[in-house]
Image (spheres, grey):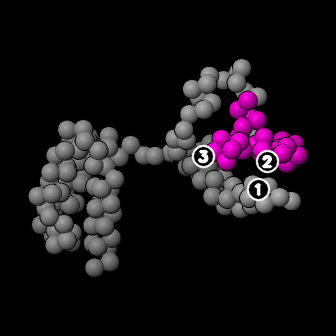
Amino acid sequence: MKKSDRVLYFDLLSYLPDDLLYKVDMASMYASLEARSPLLDHNIIELSAKIPFELKVKNFNTTKYIFKKALTQILPKDNLYRKKMGFSIPLSKWFKEDLNFYAQSILLDKNAGTKNLINQDYVKEMLSSCKKGFDCGPKLWSLITLELWLKKYF
């Protein structure tokens, strides 16, 4: 087996079941749904194992090459060739609306453990900026996580 095929085989045996399928399973169970991955049918896996690597990955930057070519007439090109989007959470929207008051109550509390670590005026400015639509979500999320961790363990 070629090195390139071994990488795909490793993904099939470890990354897929230990990471990707696990996440799908947890998310679907949380919503009381049963999810299936139709492309993981053993017949499809066996067929794809017979396809040369060069038709699966083109120039080491276009993945699922032959699969995308087969679907060109069926799916819109914008969907077929778009970048991965992931499953991010809308932190910016949350901190603009619902979580802003919560973040204030946690981070600007007089007993906040982070007040000795992070300038409170900077935190106030971030919270204000978030309300105006600026994306401070990841920073605020990290600060809240740190603050809650400090409260629990110190």
Residue 144 lies, in percent from the top left, at 29, 60
Examine the structure image and report whether residue 32 is included in the region drawn in magenta.
no
- Dots 2 and 1: beta carbons under 8 Å? yes
Kindly tell me whether residue 36 is visible in this rendering: no
Which residue is located at x 61 percent, y 24 percent? 77
State the mark number for residue 42. none
- Toward the bottom, the furthest residue is 154
Q: Which is in the foreground here, disc 1 or disc 3?
A: 1
Amino acid type shown at disc 2: Phe
Which residue is located at x 28 percent, y 79 percent? 154
Residue 84 lies, in percent from the top left, at 55, 41
Ranked by sequence position, the earlier of labels 2 and 1 is 1
In magenta, the rendered stretch is 40-69
Residue 34 lies, in percent from the top left, at 67, 43
Examine the structure image and report whether residue 61 is included in the region drawn in magenta.
yes
Q: CA distance from mark 3 to mark 2?
A: 32 Å
> Is residue 79 shown left or right of residue 2?
left
Q: Which residue is mark 1?
A: 4
Q: Which is in the foreground here, disc 3 or disc 2?
A: 2
From the viewer's perspective, is residue 72 above or below residue 107? above
Kindly tell me whether residue 4 is visible in this rendering: yes
Which residue is located at x 13 percent, y 61 percent? 120
How many residues crowd around disc 2 within 10 Å: few (fewer than 14), some, or many (20 or more)?
Answer: many
Q: Which residue is mark 3?
A: 28
> Is residue 98 shown left or right of residue 108?
right
State the mark number for residue 53. 2
Depth check: 113 or 39 in front? Answer: 39
Amino acid type shown at disc 3: Ser
- Toward the top, the furthest residue is 73
Q: Quadrant of residue 13?
A: bottom right
From the viewer's perspective, is residue 144 above or below residue 58? below
Amino acid type shown at disc 1: Ser
